[in-house]
């Protein structure tokens, strides 16, 4: 059960289990996450990072056949990437480009992942729900079957101090893992399901719907990109009611994948367009203005994005290339 002092579970949500969560304050959860997100995602001050980043590689090789998809970066110069192949977790040093597998995969995909300030990786596992991995030892700390519905595709994850939120690309739902005192992990039967409604119109079949997830700048709600329909939605975390974000006539986000919010700037990865679209959002996240598009000749279907210093880092998933054990993959850095 989510303790009343914590923040973020809906009073009328449908649990994925018989548990019945108490009402939480969404404002406290999401606004409190702003400072945490800044520390976890941005790392040291930009000026210091820039001074030491001139010689850092802009293209980092990953293991052949790795098939990266998700990325997470903490306060140090290390990127963590998950494999769509066997689910292994790889850590790359952003200063040298060197790296190693820190957690052998379970044989099932690792998709989106995020790192908290306790050194834990929260990993979306496609059809296998979610798991939490110790980034220092590689040990699996907990596993969660997020739903019994089929088909299911746990795709991406966003962290707040009180919950880990997962999208499901095949179900019109979000799932929350409520975190207890000092970040205590919940039991498997405490997973909360929130059904998406309002402006949300689920595309039927095994089409990618809910994909990347983050919060609004004011911390009042969540933002979810719906890839198949090409829209960005503002989601009330208590009720699941969504409203489509007015992006002022910008091109559809039909290839929208990973999301990254820094202040009021939203970065949206457009995977098969080999681009990152940048928007300036209103504080409440109900509208936004297109600012620019970032591209690189080194992009080859990038999927997700994380920041360190003045750079964005994106893994090339290479979805247009048939994967083999010898297929090469890279992590690409661009100035933001």
Image (cartoon, rainbow, N blue to C red):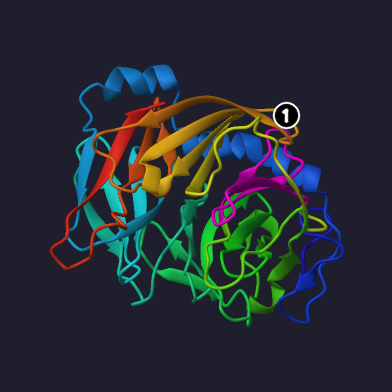
> Relative to 33, is 237 on the left or the right?
right
Residue drawn at x 67%, y 60% is 179
Q: Quadrant of residue 328?
A: bottom left
Nearer to the camera, 175 or 98: 175
Is residue 301 visible in the rendered image? The answer is yes
Q: Is residue 84 above or below residue 307?
A: below
Nearer to the camera, 25 or 208: 208
| Residue 10 falls within the magenta-colored stretch | no
Is residue 76 visible in the rendered image? The answer is no
Outermost residue, left direction?
A: 326
**Screen quadrant of the N terminus:** bottom right
| Residue 224 falls within the magenta-colored stretch | yes
Q: Secondary structure at mark 1?
A: loop
Q: Quadrant of residue 319?
A: bottom left
Residue with the mark numbered 1: 283
Nearer to the camera, 3 or 325: 325
- Answer few, some or many: residues within 10 Å of disc 1's Cα (few below 14, many 20 plus, some between 14 and 19): some
Nearer to the camera, 39 or 300: 300
Q: Position of residue 153 (x, y in %)?
A: 52, 70
Magenta segment: 211-236
Q: Is residue 125 above or below residue 19?
A: above
Q: Position of residue 132 (x, y in %)?
A: 49, 65
> Relative to 330, is 262 on the left or the right?
right
Q: Quadrant of residue 245?
A: top right
Q: Is residue 49 above or below residue 246?
A: above
Q: Position of residue 57 (x, y in %)?
A: 21, 33
Residue drawn at x 86%, y 59% is 23
> Relative to 301, is 54 on the left or the right?
left
Residue drawn at x 33%, y 30% is 334
Q: Position of residue 232 (x, y in %)?
A: 63, 45
């Amino acid at each position: 059960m989510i303790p009343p002092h914590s923040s973020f579970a809906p009073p009328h949500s449908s649990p994925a289990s018989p548990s019945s969560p108490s009402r939480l304050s969404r404002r406290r959860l999401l606004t409190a996450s702003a400072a945490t997100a800044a520390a976890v995602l941005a790392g040291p001050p930009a000026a210091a990072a820039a001074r030491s980043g001139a010689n850092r590689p802009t293209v980092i090789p990953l293991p052949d056949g790795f098939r990266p998809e998700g990325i997470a970066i903490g306060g140090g110069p290390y990127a963590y990437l998950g494999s769509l192949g066997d689910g292994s977790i790889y850590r790359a040093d952003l200063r040298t480009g060197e790296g190693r597998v820190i957690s052998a995969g379970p044989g099932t995909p690792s998709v989106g992942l995020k790192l908290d300030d306790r050194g834990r990786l929260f990993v979306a596992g496609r059809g296998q729900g979610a798991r939490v991995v110790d980034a220092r030892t590689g040990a699996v700390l907990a596993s969660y079957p997020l739903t019994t519905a089929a088909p299911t595709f746990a795709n991406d994850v966003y962290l707040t101090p009180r919950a880990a939120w997962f999208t499901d690309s095949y179900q019109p739902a979000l799932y929350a893992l409520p975190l207890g005192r000092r970040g205590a992990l919940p039991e498997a039967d405490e997973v909360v399901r929130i059904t998406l409604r309002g402006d949300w119109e689920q595309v039927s079949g095994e089409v990618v719907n809910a994909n990347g997830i983050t919060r609004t700048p004011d911390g009042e709600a969540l933002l979810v990109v719906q890839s198949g329909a090409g829209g960005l939605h503002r989601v009330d975390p208590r009720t699941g009611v969504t409203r489509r974000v007015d992006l002022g006539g910008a091109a559809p986000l039909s290839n929208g994948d990973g999301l990254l919010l820094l202040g009021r700037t939203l970065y949206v990865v457009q995977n098969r367009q080999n681009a990152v679209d940048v928007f300036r959002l209103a504080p409440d996240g109900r509208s936004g203005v297109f600012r620019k598009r970032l591209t690189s000749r080194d992009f080859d279907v990038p999927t997700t994005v994380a920041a360190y210093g003045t750079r964005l880092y994106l893994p090339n998933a290479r979805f247009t290339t048939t994967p083999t054990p010898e297929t090469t993959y890279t992590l690409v850095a661009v100035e933001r």
